[in-house]
Image (cartoon, rainbow, N blue to C red):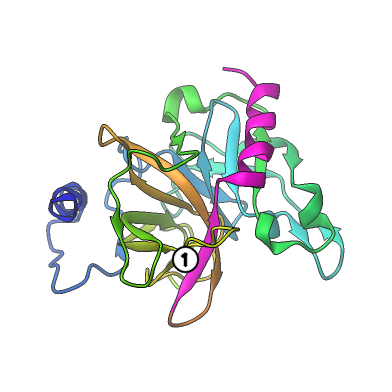
Amino acid sequence: MKKIILSFILLAHLPAHTSVIGELGRLPVANSESPTFRVFGQVEDFCTGTMISPRLVLTAAHCVYNQQEKSWMPLRTFTPARDRSLAPFGSIAVERVHVPASYLVGDDRQDLAVLVLREAVGFKTGWLRIGWDLQGFLRHNSALGGFAASGTISGYPGDQEQGSMWFVACDFYVPNLTPLLPQYRCDTFGGMSGSALVIAGPRGESTVVGVHTKGHGKFNSGIMLTHENKVFLQQILIQYPL
């Protein structure tokens, strides 16, 4: 039943000329200003981020810090709901960046970052809630062990027109082993790093459970917002109350 519900939600946002045959592949977002998609945006012109509070954007740590060179990326702005040359909410200056200390010394298991924006643009775009423990979510046991949940990834793939937003739906497979590193066959490309892994919450609301971080070919992967990642994010959310 959950896959049927998800399909109807996704089909409602497809352009009229689109046909879905078999598995749902990567598709262009017809209206980036719609409530479903305006919570996502482009970090500079090379990564994707998601609003998680009025001033906070969730993305991947490798979008802001280069582990190999031990240097920070030239990061200035976040553009929510960008659609090619259009920026309906403007490009918002990034005031501060938070990255887990463990990532700075080479731990990829905490490949996430939070951008602090100078303006509270989230009051215009809205923001997504975070699922901390996955209890009560629409999920099912996987034949491979662990569980799987149907979800979506929205972002800015570098193989498409600059600044165009795309989304894809698939199952996120999460093994029982800690740290929980989700794997999936969603069709992604460079530029979608930092995209949120979104599933339906207990009441059907869009909920962030992870961050897309790597492309491996057959399987792509990310990180879950549990354990150490949960502690890191909750500490930041306390620092920047609504």
- Bounds of the magenta span? 219-242
On the image, the x and y values in percent for residue 107 come to: 75, 61
The quadrant where residue 172 appears:
bottom left
Q: Is residue 220 magenta?
A: yes
Count of marks overlaid on the render: 1
Q: Is residue 39 above or below residue 53?
A: below
For residue 73, which quarter of the picture? bottom right
- Please identify the quarter of the rendering in which residue 169 is found: bottom left
SS under mark 1:
loop
Position of the C terminus by quadrant:
top right
**Residue 165 seen by the camera:** no
- Residue where numbered disc 1 is placed: 157
Residue drawn 42% across the image and 28% down it: 126
Give left or right: position of 186 versus 69. Answer: left
Q: Amino acid at mark 1?
A: Pro
Query: As displayed, is residue 201 above or below residue 157?
Result: above
Residue 199 on image: x %, y %: 35, 47
Where residue 234 appears, x then y in whole percent? 63, 31
**231 drawn magenta:** yes
Along the horizontal axis of the image, is 109 left or right of 142? right
Q: Is residue 105 above or below residue 12?
A: below
Residue 106 in view (yes/no): yes
Residue drawn at x 50%, y 54% is 195
Residue sitting at 71 percent across and 45 percent down? 76
Q: Label 1: how many residues lie within 10 Å, few (<14), some (14-19) or many (20+)? A: many
Give residue 158's position: percent from left, percent from top: 51, 69
Q: Work out which residue is located at the far bottom of the displayed protein and give it.
A: 217
